[in-house]
Amino acid sequence: MLGRMSDNSLISQPDKHPGPVKRSPIKRHSESITHDVAGNTVYDLLRNGGPTTVTQILTLLAYMQGWSWPTIIIASTGVFLALTIMVAIGITIWQRRKAVPEQATPTSEIATLTEHSCPDRWLHELADNQRHSINSWVHAMSISIQQHDLLRDSPYIDFKFTVHNSSVYTLSLDTVHGSIGYAGRRLGGQPILAANSITGMRPSNTKDCVVRQPLLKEDAVLILNMGGSFEFNELRLRVRGGEGMADVEPGNLILSQAIQHQELHKAYPKLDVEIQEVKLKSYCELDEQNWPTKDLGVVINMKVRFKNLRERRIVIENFRLDANPHIAPTATAKTGEIYESPTISSTKKSLYRGELLDNLSSGPIRADQGEPHEGWLQFTILNVRVDNFTDATPMLIIVDVSGEEHLMEIPALKRG
């Protein structure tokens, strides 16, 4: 009966030769963590006072057994030394074992992160979208004027562009072309990159570059003479993907900002002009008895004092008077000798009456910094009457050799 029961197939028989048990990578990893935790615990116990604790316990047991103190001391010392040596050897072996890198889990057992398996697929879609329109994700946060010199033979202005990377790519700025404008006019020189730190700019980073705008002399004069703003909508600053990101399509920064001229003009102060006295007289034709017979126009005598506030010398070339809206063309100050009341005879011969005035417009004036210059200016304007200037607000224009204009509004004109 027992024999038949032993042959019953329903009774499980132990396998005398069990085959190797396959364990999943997760199970092997969890077992490794368990072993490491247990091993580290034992390691810490042995390292932190293990020989001392064991020696104390053995000493107490020996004392309870009635051993003599000399014997206890000798035995305890021997035990302590032996345990210390054993712990040191064990720690050395443990540290060497930990230094050996564990066998890497086969790559076939690790799921590869792809666009299809990534839980953040939206990020892949965002990156692909940015790759085709990178200039929409890189912004010029500010544009400012840095170095400049409008007075030298080769004038220039440096513009600093502070750029922020809002994309998920590392980017670089590599080229500049196009043009910069001022007051609706394109500046003549070709912009160049004078300095550039926008290389390898990581996401959410902000860096800057400096674009130098070389100027023609007429550009510099235009900027000094005319109010306006600098425009950059025709400037092209190209941004591309950084190292290893060649699939990013290059694009130009969108530059819609404009910079006003006021801060730049502060660096180039105009002449400090003071109009001390103004006299308005009729310019007449005289008969043979020197009686006025015909009004030909007006004569404006003006006493002016000015000085140069700049470090560099300003060379004054001429003086002009703009009497707009009453006078269409501007009048230029007379050179040579000037008298208080000039007239003309019936034979068209110039007659001079009154006091000889110290003519300020007698030739180029080299005005160094802080040096005052003063004298009289005389303007003769034909075909107008004195009454035309009743409500006029003329403008004195002092022109230097570069063509730069220094303006001064003339106070109300009175007949004198």
Image: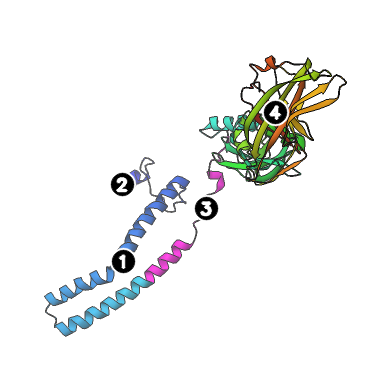
**Does the residue at mark 2 contact the one at mark 4 (Cβ under 8 Å)?**
no
The disc, 2 or 4, on the residue closer to the chain's N-terminal end is: 2
Q: Is residue 113 magenta?
A: yes
Q: Nearer the viewer, mark 3 or mark 2?
A: 3
Q: Is residue 101 magenta?
A: yes
Identify the residue at the far bottom of this view. Answer: 70
In the image, which disc is placed on residue 259?
none
The residue shown at (36%, 59%) is 40
Sequence order check, earlier mark of 1 and 2: 2
The reply to whether dot 1 and dot 4 touch (C-beta < 8 Å) is no
Residue 333 in picture, x, y percent from top left: 75, 30
Tell whether 295 sits left or right of 194: right
Q: Secondary structure at mark 3?
A: loop
- The disc, 4 or 3, on the residue closer to the chain's N-terminal end is 3
Q: Which residue is mark 2?
A: 2
Kind of residue at badge 4 = Asn
Q: Where does label 4 land, which residue?
A: 301
- Mark 3 residue crowding within 10 angstroms, few (<14) / some (14–19) / many (20+): few
**Which residue corresponds to the image point at 80% horizontal and 20% vertical from the top-left?**
290
What distance separates the C-alpha of mark 3 from that of mark 2? Answer: 52 Å
Residue 46: mark in rendering: 1
The answer to the question of whether label 3 and label 2 lie on touching residues, with beta carbons closer than 8 A, is: no
Measured as percent of width and height from the top left, residue 138 is found at 60, 34
Of 171 and 132, the residue lying toward us: 171
Looking at marks 1 and 3 on the same chain, the residue that comes earlier in the sequence is marked by: 1
Image quarter of residue 390: top right
Secondary structure under the numbered disc 1 in the rendered image: helix
Q: Is residue 85 visible?
A: yes
